[in-house]
Amino acid sequence: MNILIADDDAMQRELLGGFLEKQGHRVFAAADGEEALRLFGQEHIQLALLDHRMPDMTGDQVLERMKAQNPLVRAIMITAYGAVSTAVSVMKLGADDFLEKPVDLTQLLVKIDALDQQVAIADDVNELVQAIEEAPLPLDIIGSSPAMRETLSRVRRVADSPWSVLIQGETGTGKELIARLIHLLGSTPDAPFVEVNCAAIPEHLFESELFGHEKGAFTGADRQHKGRFEQARGGTLFLDEVGELPASLQSKLLRALQEKRISRVGSERDIAVETRVVAATNRDLRTMAEDGGFREDLYFRLNVLDVPLSPLRQRREDIPALIEHFIARYARRPTQLAPEALDVLMRYHYPGNVRELKHIIQRTLTLARGSRLQASDLPDEVRRAEPQDQGALQERLDSVEREMLVAALDACDWIQTHAADRLGISERVLRYKMGKYGIRRKE
């Protein structure tokens, strides 16, 4: 990463620059704001470490001018110890993070690594968006929340791989959409994409559906039938709800994945199939494998690469964009959403995720009498839904956080500086949380 250090303290510049160069970064150093801006204009700077107090201009003034030139530049502001109000103000200006003096080098490295990951995710998402724009795909990808960006970044990375992919998420999160996106962004987008719903096919017909059968293999088999594996040859076989696959068929699927060969029902001849398998499930296959409900070797064979999908309640930032998309798609006349209706929709917990939100909008558009959707137009179960017990949830979260703090302190022999580094927080935040939860070392 190209990093610019702007600080009027020569010793600080030398310390930070030497440390970061040893970590493999390319470092540029400036003694004041003007020099920092000159270097920023000449070099491709990805991250700026800015001292808040410099003689000619403050760090936030430098940051403002940098952001005007390149809004994507990342920045960490270095502030005086305890300057919380300053830290808040620079974060509002667009700094990604801040550090207090004296700079803890370990903490600095943790923050840079985190920003490096964010940059990589942004690059993946930009590549995906560019691919969609250059070759428009027959899919609608809605959402810009951190969770959705992480999902799209992972899709971008796994799409070109030939390995099996396991998509895991609750019902209605869009697993089939992601499977199709992986196929279309892969190396063979024009090859077949064949879907099998493992929960919908009767067990006695499943082997025939998956592997095919020969004429006369069983009663009613009046002709030869190619199974889904053969139909998807050279492309993608999507096994939806793979957690529902009968135990008797799991071993046969495992063999097909291992050997890349299948045998039709009623045939003794093997057929080679070069087919990529993408599977999806709303169940915890790892737990099922540990409990004996799913073959462990099949789980690992399917889960070479994984794409976890977050439920809608964990990415509420995407709800307004999804609502706007569904209204534009399904409204038969120009329609607006009243602020009160949006508020109700934002508070709802969506056990059925994006699919449920789509159905809510479809139903509301169909039954509403006016062109402005009011809260009263929404389904009763949405308007009258009890808010989730935030108090109980917060109590559980606090309990987990307290346990993490105590565990880190125990592991570091209650040396607060080391424990804060271990947790990735500042020592000041650690002290605050210790006071909040009444954490004291037991003598």
Image: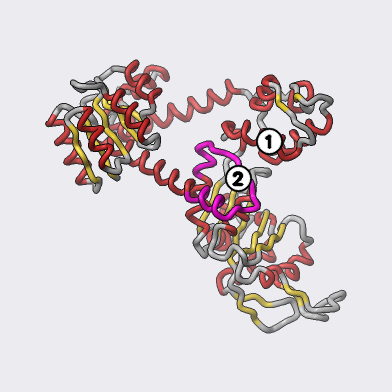
Query: Which quadrant would residue 268 be assigned to in this image?
Result: bottom right
Q: Position of residue 415 (x, y in %)?
A: 26, 28
Is residue 440 visible from the viewing direction of this image? no
Q: What's the residue at 44%, 43% (across, down)?
A: 122
Q: Is residue 268 left or right of residue 289?
A: right
Q: Is residue 24 above or below residue 225?
A: above
Is residue 313 visible from the viewing direction of this image? yes
Instruction: Name the residue beneath numbered marker 1.
Output: 351
User: From the image, which quarter does the C terminus lie in?
Assistant: top left
Q: Is residue 428 magenta?
A: no
Instruction: Name the residue beneath numbered marker 2.
Output: 141
Q: Are marks 1 and 2 in contact (CB under 8 Å)?
A: no
Q: Is residue 379 above or below residue 132?
A: above
Q: Is residue 138 magenta?
A: yes
Amino acid identity at mark 2: Ile
Label 1 and label 2: CA atoms lie apart by: 21 Å
Q: Earlier along the polypeptide chain: callout 1 or callout 2?
A: 2
Q: Secondary structure at mark 2?
A: loop
Q: Position of residue 207 (x, y in %)?
A: 73, 69
